[in-house]
Image (spheres, rainbow, N blue to C red):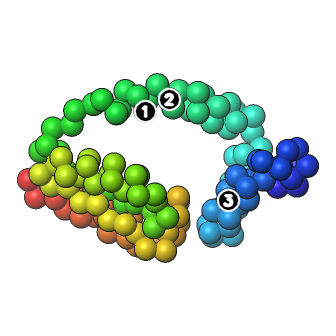
């Protein structure tokens, strides 16, 4: 965080958000997160992911998913109206779609509301098993 402040200031808000998200994790997990992000390969992996993101997103945006495929989308409470509209359109395309705006959540919904994430997963598993 200190390096981000000194480097340009612009990176500080991103780093502060990430630190805030990591602090939501149980403290016993923090050393594992730190160990992971001290490895150069972690940054190389992230760089590769970010580099391929525009092409992957473009491919996904034109994919046609059959309406019979069930879909559940959990949206953070701080999602923008355009993000919510895009997700609602995806859900409405499915004959078994569900869109939940998760209260009191940010980008890492699984850390803010793990019970709701577990519930959504269990509902999908139950649905698939019942078929």
| Vertical arrangement, residue 86 with respect to residue 66, above or below | below
* Image coordinates for residue 130, horizontal then vertical, percent: 10, 58
Residue closest to the far left: 131
Using the image, determine if residue 4 lies above or below residue 41.
below
Question: Which residue carries the number 3 mark?
Answer: 17
Q: CA distance from mark 1 to mark 3?
A: 23 Å
Secondary structure found at label 3: helix
Residue 33 lies left or right of residue 81; in this view the side is right
* Residue under pointer 1: 57
**Helix, strand or loop at disc 2?**
helix
Q: Rate crowding at label 1 as few (under 14), some (14 to 19) or many (20 or more) other CA atoms within 10 Å.
A: few
Q: Residue at x 65, y 31 (%)?
A: 47
Q: Earlier in the sequence, mark 1 or mark 3?
A: 3
Q: Which residue is mark 2?
A: 54
Residue 98: percent from left, percent from top? 24, 60
Q: Is residue 90 left or right of residue 41?
A: left
Q: Are marks 1 and 2 in contact (CB under 8 Å)?
A: yes
SS at mark 1 in the image: helix
Decide if residue 12 is on the left or right side of residue 98. Answer: right
Tell me if residue 15 comes above or below residue 100 in the rendering: above
């Amino acid at each position: 965080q200190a390096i981000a402040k000194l480097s340009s200031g612009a990176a500080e808000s991103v780093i502060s958000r990430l630190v805030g998200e990591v602090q939501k994790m149980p403290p016993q997990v923090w050393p594992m997160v730190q160990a992971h992000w001290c490895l150069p390969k972690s940054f190389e992996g992230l760089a590769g992911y970010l580099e391929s993101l525009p092409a992957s997103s473009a491919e996904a945006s034109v994919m046609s998913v059959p309406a019979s495929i069930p879909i559940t989308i959990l949206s953070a409470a701080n999602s923008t109206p355009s993000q919510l509209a895009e997700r609602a359109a995806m859900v409405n395309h499915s004959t078994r779609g569900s869109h939940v705006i998760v209260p009191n959540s940010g980008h890492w919904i699984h850390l803010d509301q793990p019970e709701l994430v577990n519930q959504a997963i269990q509902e999908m598993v139950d649905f698939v098993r019942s078929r």
